Image: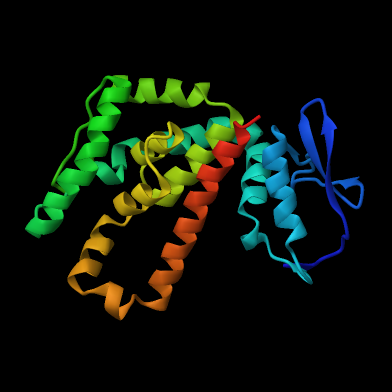
């Protein structure tokens, strides 16, 4: 957190898009790259985040700025990040189902099974699932098709895929999010399936959750909705 040091927030049209300026000076990412948005509506939203800061600049209240700077700075790390994303495929959340309790198992089959079917339809390959603790190894063709898909993403979609996959612990859910086929609320439901189910049993709606759990879920919701907003604004001309 730092003290607000600027008065005016604006943008300058350049060849690459719209560059963020504070008091007429360009703003750089941590790696020294100029912060540039591909569309005016996205930059307008970024400007709104900076303009809303008061005495202190609070990065956690500027999710779109954080995503944009991440997208710019991570361009040089795509190979390494892609490799880290691919490691999720054999350990994906939605591929490991419980045997019991019966209610959880049924919910996983309904929700996680649905997203496994989505993957199979989209990539035209089947996913292995298990109810054992032993690690699965998905087919080589499955890895190849997902790798090719990720390689074809532009830097903005790639960044969103990385953020959402890390957020939910599932590359399958991240891919569905990138395609626009899963909403932030559905992502929350799938990622917190067991916790939300237990919450229904213990009537969390009435009694509430622990402060730590509530804070974690709020951060998840904020980041998921910011990721969806970022993609929408990055594509709106």
Q: Quadrant of the N terminus?
A: bottom right
Residue situated in front as seen by the camera: 76 or 93? 93
Picture coordinates of residue 207, whole percent (x, y): 29, 80
- Which of the 4 image quadrants contains residue 13? top right
Picture coordinates of residue 230, whole percent (x, y): 58, 42
Picture coordinates of residue 91, whole percent (x, y): 30, 42
Residue sitting at x 18%, y 38% = 129
Residue situated in front as seen by the camera: 38 or 96? 38
Residue situated in front as seen by the camera: 113 or 130? 113
Determine whether 136 is above or below 224 in the image: above
Residue sitting at x 27%, y 19% = 124
Residue sitting at x 86%, y 63% = 5
Let me know if residue 98 appears in the view: no
Residue sitting at x 49%, y 61% = 219
- Which of the 4 image quadrants contains residue 118? top left
Residue situated in front as seen by the camera: 137 or 159? 159
* 202 to the left or right of 235: left
* 219 to the left or right of 131: right
């Amino acid at each position: 957190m730092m003290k607000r040091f600027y008065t005016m927030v604006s943008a300058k049209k350049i060849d690459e898009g719209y560059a963020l300026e504070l008091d007429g000076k360009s703003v750089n990412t941590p790696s020294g790259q100029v912060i540039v948005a591909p569309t005016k509506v996205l930059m307008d939203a970024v400007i709104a985040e900076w303009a809303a800061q008061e005495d202190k600049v609070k990065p956690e209240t500027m999710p779109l700025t954080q995503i944009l700077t991440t997208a710019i700075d991570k361009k040089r790390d795509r190979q390494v990040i892609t490799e880290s994303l691919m490691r999720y495929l054999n350990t994906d959340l939605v591929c490991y189902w419980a045997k019991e309790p019966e209610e959880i198992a049924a919910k996983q089959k309904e929700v996680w099974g649905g997203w496994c079917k989505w993957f199979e339809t989209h990539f035209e390959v089947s996913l292995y699932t298990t109810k054992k603790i032993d690690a699965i190894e998905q087919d080589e063709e499955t890895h190849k098709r997902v790798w090719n898909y990720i390689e074809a993403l532009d830097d903005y979609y790639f960044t969103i895929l990385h953020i959402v996959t890390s957020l939910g612990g599932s590359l399958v859910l991240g891919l569905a999010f990138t395609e626009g086929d899963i909403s932030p609320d559905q992502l929350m439901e799938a990622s917190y399936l067991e916790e939300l189910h237990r919450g229904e049993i213990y009537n969390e709606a009435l009694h509430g959750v622990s402060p730590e759990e509530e804070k974690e879920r709020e951060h998840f919701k904020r980041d998921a909705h910011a990721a969806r907003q970022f993609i929408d604004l990055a594509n709106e001309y």
